[in-house]
Image (tube, rainbow, N blue to C red):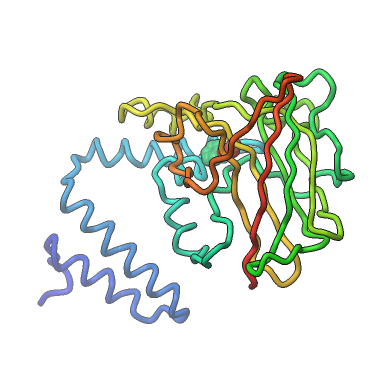
């Protein structure tokens, strides 16, 4: 066949042929699959020139929205279910281990390390007071002394500190004690919208979706010899548990945040890490 007069089918084969000498075998596999699926998508959808350009403008705008404290591509990956798909593939099941969920765009490396029992909410932070406690264990139920727990959450008005630029608030790192136990104070997580003033928000509206996430507390656990665990504790009874905008809810991560007679909330959860 002529290598010039491609038609819609032979073009795909020719693009793949031109990449044959890619040295890195994984890159070759990824690129070939990407081209095949992208061409198949175009064959199926048959975009007009205008529609294709709209798609390119959408991706360009998504890039322009990325800055400190805002990662619109992560948001796109999250709201299209891709982040959870990557998580399912990579964080394999180990019977008895705590399940993982999406990291989200609001994790900040290097949060202040606080002593056990500390309150991660600055005085005056909106929200209902909450105490969280539990143990970090291995698959045999043995405590993991000194395990590290990063915690982050929104205030009671549904914003992370990095969205409000008021300095560090509602995020910290704790170390479990010699018996693997931890406890800290914070505020009761509330449901809140993922940032929806940009292109991803427009996509959600255009596809008839809401931007809400059920109330949750983010946790990232690590300890030498164990897989890093990125997860959340979700608030039992939240009305968005069945329609999380980023598909992150797992039944085993739903926790009863109990209100005590004094009006304070408490939650208890034991994390189980799997060996690396
Ligand atoms: C979050 O829970 O922080 C989050 C996750 C995905 C997208 C936006 C926010
Ligand atoms: Fe969150």
Residue at the image position 72 percent from the left and 20 percent from the top = 261
Residue at the image position 66 percent from the left and 54 percent from the top = 271
Total count of labels: 0
Farthest-out residue, front: 261
- Res. 10 image quadrant: bottom left
Give coordinates of residue 160: x percent, y percent. Answer: 67, 30
Residue at the image position 39 percent from the left and 36 percent from the top = 58
Q: Is residue 128 visible?
A: yes
Give coordinates of residue 159: x percent, y percent. Answer: 64, 26
Q: Is residue 201 left or right of residue 208?
A: right
Give coordinates of residue 65: x percent, y percent. Answer: 54, 34
Does residue 24 sit above or below 44 in this rendering?
Answer: below
In which of the image's four quarters is ligand 2 placed? top right
- Res. 28 image quadrant: bottom left
Does residue 22 sit above or below 144 in this rendering?
Answer: below
Q: Which residue is more in the foreground, 254 or 164? A: 254
Q: Is residue 143 left or right of residue 20?
A: right
Quarter that holds the N terminus? bottom left
Residue at the image position 81 percent from the left and 54 percent from the top = 176
Q: Which residue is more in the foreground, 123 or 274? A: 274
Q: Is residue 66 visible?
A: no
Q: Which residue is more in the foreground, 47 or 260? A: 260
Does residue 246 sit above or below 130 in this rendering?
Answer: below
Quarter that holds the C terminus? bottom right
Farthest-out residue, right: 115
- Res. 99 image quadrant: bottom right
Give coordinates of residue 202: x percent, y percent. Answer: 40, 27
Q: Is residue 11 left or right of residue 104?
A: left
């Amino acid at each position: 066949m002529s290598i010039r007069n491609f038609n819609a089918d032979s073009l795909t084969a020719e693009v793949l042929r031109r990449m044959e000498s890619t040295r890195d075998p994984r890159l070759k596999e990824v690129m070939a699959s990407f081209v095949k699926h992208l061409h198949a998508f175009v064959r199926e959808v048959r975009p007009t020139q205008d529609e294709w350009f709209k798609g390119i403008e959408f991706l360009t705008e998504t890039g322009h929205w990325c800055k400190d404290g805002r990662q619109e591509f992560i948001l796109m990956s999250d709201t299209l279910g891709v982040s959870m798909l990557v998580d399912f593939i990579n964080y394999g099941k180990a019977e008895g281990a705590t399940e993982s969920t999406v990291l989200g765009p609001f994790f900040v490396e290097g949060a202040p390390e606080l002593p056990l029992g500390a309150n991660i909410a600055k005085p005056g932070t909106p929200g209902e007071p909450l105490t969280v406690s539990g143990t970090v264990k291995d698959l045999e139920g043995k405590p993991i002394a000194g395990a590290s727990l990063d915690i982050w959450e929104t205030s009671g008005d549904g914003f992370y500190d990095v969205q409000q630029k008021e300095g560090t608030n509602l995020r910290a790192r704790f170390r479990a004690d010699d018996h693997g136990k931890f406890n800290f104070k914070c505020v009761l997580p509330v449901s809140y919208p993922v940032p929806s003033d940009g292109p991803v928000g427009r996509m959600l509206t255009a596809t008839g979706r809401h931007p809400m996430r059920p109330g949750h507390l983010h946790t990232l656990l690590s300890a030498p010899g164990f897989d890093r665990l990125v997860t959340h504790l979700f608030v039992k009874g939240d009305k968005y548990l069945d329609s999380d905008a980023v598909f992150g809810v797992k039944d085993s991560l739903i926790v009863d945040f109990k209100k005590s007679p004094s009006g304070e909330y408490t939650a208890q959860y034991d994390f189980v890490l799997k060996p690396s």
